[in-house]
């Protein structure tokens, strides 16, 4: 699904995509759980924890990727 979205939004032929790029800056975050997905765990990381459930109060050392994404979102919202 994401590959299709990226293909669409970067298209030079789709007029809607061209107009969207004029109005919106898209920040695309890749899969944050590649290790878990490789092991067949689509919702949990290798430690067995659901990264979505760790979003509100993530532990810096246990869930650094969640902390990094939260920091990025905060920085982008302050611009």
Image (cartoon, rainbow, N blue to C red):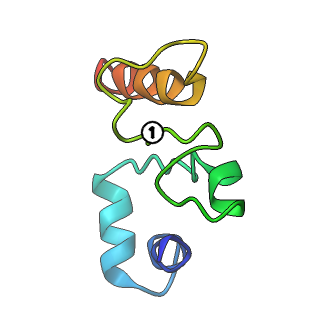
Decide which of 9, 1 is in the foreground and name it.
1
Decide which of 11, 36 is in the foreground and name it.
36
- Where 7 falls versus 21 (above or below)? below
Instruction: Tell me where residue 2 appears, x and y as whole percent.
Output: 49, 70
**Which picture quadrant has residue 40?**
bottom right
Q: Residue at 58% x, 44% y: name it.
A: 45
- Where 6 falls versus 59 (above or below)? below
Q: Residue at 48% x, 14% y: name it.
A: 59
Q: Is residue 30 left or right of residue 16?
A: right
Given the current orientation, which residue lies at the most extreme front position?
A: 48
Instruction: Tell me where residue 58 appears, x and y as whole percent.
Output: 42, 20
In the picture, which quadrant includes the C terminus? top left
| Total residue callouts | 1
Given the current orientation, which residue lies at the most extreme top position?
A: 60
Decide which of 36, 79 is in the foreground and name it.
36
- Where 44 falls versus 16 (above or below)? above
Q: Is residue 41 left or right of residue 15?
A: right
Residue on which disc 1 sits: 51
Q: Residue at 29% x, 24% y: name it.
A: 56
Instruction: Tell me where residue 21 appears, x and y as whole percent.
Output: 38, 60
Q: Residue at 31% x, 69% y: name it.
A: 19
Instruction: Tell me where residue 70 appears, x and y as whole percent.
Output: 41, 25
Q: Residues within 10 Å of mark 1 (few under 14, many from 20)?
A: some
Q: Secondary structure at mark 1?
A: loop
């Amino acid at each position: 699904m994401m590959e299709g979205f990226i293909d669409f939004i970067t298209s030079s032929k789709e007029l809607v995509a061209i107009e969207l790029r004029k109005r919106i800056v898209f920040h695309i975050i890749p899969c944050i759980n590649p290790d878990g997905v490789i092991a067949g765990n689509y919702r949990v990381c290798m430690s067995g924890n659901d990264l979505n459930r760790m979003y509100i109060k993530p532990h810096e050392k246990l869930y650094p990727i969640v902390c990094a994404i939260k920091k990025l979102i905060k920085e982008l919202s302050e611009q």
